[in-house]
Image (tube, grey):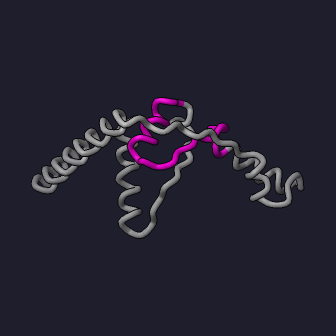
Amino acid sequence: MEGVVFETKTVLTDLKTNGCNVDRLRIMGGASKSRVWSGIIAAVTSCQTSCMKEPEACCMGAAIIAAVGSGAYHNYQEAVSQMVKTESIDKVDLETLQFYIQKYEEYQQLFRLIEKYTKERY
């Protein structure tokens, strides 16, 4: 779980470096089903994080399209505002935040070593 989240943080950092600052995340799928994983995401990314109450995003998307297509809602924005529900992840305590800051730094160091090794070898 942490490796996936660390890679997410790396992507978010790259986006920020290139002018796209992401400060909010909505989690769906497997991570949204786990309070532990959701908490790790909030701690590592430092983003305002919320979980979709309906974790199966594809099914929800199909239902939204069907609802608009059948005339139950006038447009997608209306359908989403009525159908999509989220739950905010609590703020992370300082001790957890510091723990993951250290772990992310170690992850980056390890990644750089692996990258260096593979470049030297191949």
Tell which of 63 and 96 is nearer to you. Answer: 96
How many numbered tags mark residues here? Answer: 0
Q: Does 69 appear above or below 1?
A: below
Tell which of 108 and 117 is nearer to you. Answer: 108
User: In screen coordinates, is 122 left or right of 66?
Assistant: left
Q: Quadrant of residue 85?
A: top right
Question: Which residue is depicted at the point 47% across and 49% down?
Answer: 47
User: In screen coordinates, is 46 left or right of 55?
Assistant: left
Q: Position of residue 40 (x, y in %)?
A: 42, 37
Question: Which residue is depicted at the point 24% across and 45% down?
Answer: 105
Question: Which residue is depicted at the point 80% across and 60% down?
Answer: 75
Q: Does 103 appear above or below 78?
A: above
Question: Which residue extends farthest right?
Answer: 71
Q: Quadrant of residue 52?
A: top right
Tell which of 105 and 113 is nearer to you. Answer: 105
Question: Which residue extends farthest front?
Answer: 94
Tell which of 64 and 102 is nearer to you. Answer: 102
Q: Position of residue 77 (x, y in %)?
A: 75, 59
Residues in magenta, as a range: 34-58
User: In screen coordinates, is 27 left or right of 79?
Assistant: left
Question: Which residue is depicted at the point 41% across and 47% down?
Answer: 45
Q: Which quadrant of the figure contains the C terminus?
A: bottom left
Question: Which residue extends farthest left?
Answer: 120
Q: Position of residue 98 (x, y in %)?
A: 31, 38
Is 48 covered by the magenta stretch?
Answer: yes
